[in-house]
Image (cartoon, rainbow, N blue to C red):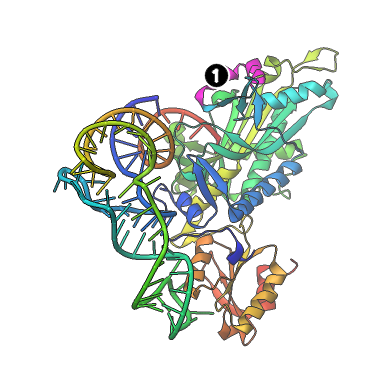
Amino acid sequence: MRLSQSLIPTIKEVPSEAQIASHRLMLRAGLVRQTSAGIYAWLPAGLRLLNNIADIVREEQDAAGAQEVLMPTIQPATLWQESGRYEDYGKEMLRIKDRHERDMLYGPTNEEMITDLYRQSVKSYKELPQVAYQIQWKFRDEVRPRFGVMRGREFYMKDAYSFDIDYEGAFVTYRRMMLAYMRTFQRLGVKAIPMVADTGPIGGDLSHEFIILAPTGESQVFYDAAFEDVDYGAANFDSAKPDDLGRFFGIMTDNYAATEEKHDLDVWGKIDDSRKREGRGIEIGHIFYFGTKYSKAMNFAVTGPDGQKLFPEMGSYGIGVSRMAGALIEASHDEAGIIWPDSVAPFKAAILNLKQGDPTTDALCEDLYGKLRKVALYDDRSERAGVKFADADLMGHPWQIIIGPRGAANGLVELKRRATGEREELSLDAALAKIGLNAS
RNA sequence: CGGGACGUAGCACAGCCUGGUAGUGCGCCUGCUUCGGGAGCAGGAGGCCGGAGGUUCGAAUCCUCUCGUCCCGACCA
């Protein structure tokens, strides 16, 4: 994109409502704007970020054998009355009436809806197991939204639902999804630690939450460095093999990890100091096994091998996609601004034209932009160099390709790595090769 | 849902206590100079002071109500 023609409004001063780093930086970098408490508009750069995160989540869900669906945001109250949660959910649920005075709601989660869809069509155990997921907006009317996008009322979330014919199958699915989560987080460039969790209003008895470390996290967490040493990639674990899943799950559950509420000083004390990791954590995902809670309540039964009625064993699996956007910034920023991991950056590189209007510089920039149109942001504004440097640092592009009249005369550009601050002067082709963006 | 604050120009704020019709910095526009880390000078645009009601000759300022936003706590992907 050309910055001069984009709705990417960077600002020097921060609106006073933003308290934490990620919120301030998301506003300053022009990623989002708040429209109501806990409700945000995603501007072009922010949307690219959101989509990049969602794409990685999607790829790993697909790789784990889940199928993507898209369910409505507005749901009929009748479904929730069947499960009993219409009453249980309380004021967090946004309730609406349509013109016919029918009770509707903006979905905070989708167990009822997916169960309804399965019971309509799936009648035999032979059609299971299945996992379906969606990446969709949800709404929970938090009493006190805060931390910008990290604790909004409207949020973008990947939610998956699994149906197995017995506990053993459900447990395999649970472990496979957990592995998919660790792979997803690894690709997103964050350290995520699974911790045994309360199941909350969704219910069930096997549940983990995934916490990533960031200085402004909501709670103190403790874990063994063993989690960081693991490569969760397909080369190390084949998610189709039960043995691999077992080995993986062993690592996830045998090593110590706990939030402060569940911290056990005796166990912690026995861990070698060099392997202790401690910090603030942000919950970024949550997985649950809850058995037949919804299949029974909503009468979703299939015919089993013995011809008898069988209620599928279910689980659900969430990743907060919009929350992840904020969490990534919490985990990766400095005084100057955001430092995006390469995998999710809205733009892989920014082209900084230091002297808009200089024929040589303009020509070199245009040439480069022509090659990087899809992945780069071209700062073609007639601003001074200092403004462009500051905005590029603020927006956090992994690479800055700095083009000024000095180097342009010799066909040279300067390449800056945001994360390290390293700069070097080299030819345009060499710069492209180094960034690894040649093909696009 | 308990506790506490704040709404004045796009943003950050002053003015309010002690009523007299609004100001500063940044941003924005124009011109000149500048031009590799958020430039300088000059000129300019922009606000029915969140909304409604009240007190008063007169309300940003005092009173009441209302809407909105933020912070602490409890709660949550």
The answer to whether residue A4 is visible is yes
- Location of residue A126 in the rendering, given as x and y in whole percent from the top left corner: 85, 25
Q: What residue is rendered at 61% in x and 57% in y? A: A346
Task: Decide which of A238, B60 is in the foreground and name it.
Answer: B60
Residue A240 on the magenta span: no
Crowd tier of the residue under label 1, counting other residues whose Cα lies within 10 Å: few below 14, some 14–19, many 20 or above: few
The answer to whether residue A271 is visible is no
| Residue wearing tag 1 | A88
**Vertical arrangement, residue A347 with respect to residue A193, above or below:** below
Q: Quadrant of residue A167?
A: top right
Task: Decide which of A80, B33 is in the foreground and name it.
Answer: B33
Looking at the rendered structure, the kind of residue marked 1 is Asp
Quadrant in which the C terminus of chain A appears: bottom right
Task: Decide which of B22, A297 is in the foreground and name it.
Answer: B22
Q: Is residue A345 left or right of residue A36?
A: right
- Location of residue A220 in the rendering, given as x and y in whole percent from the top left corner: 43, 40
Residue A85 on the magenta span: yes
Which chain letter goes with mark 1? A
Q: Is residue B25 left or right of residue A363?
A: left
Q: What residue is rendered at 75% in x and 67% in y? A: A439
Q: Which residues are magenta?
A: A77-91
- Location of residue B21 in the rendering, given as x and y in whole percent from the top left corner: 27, 53
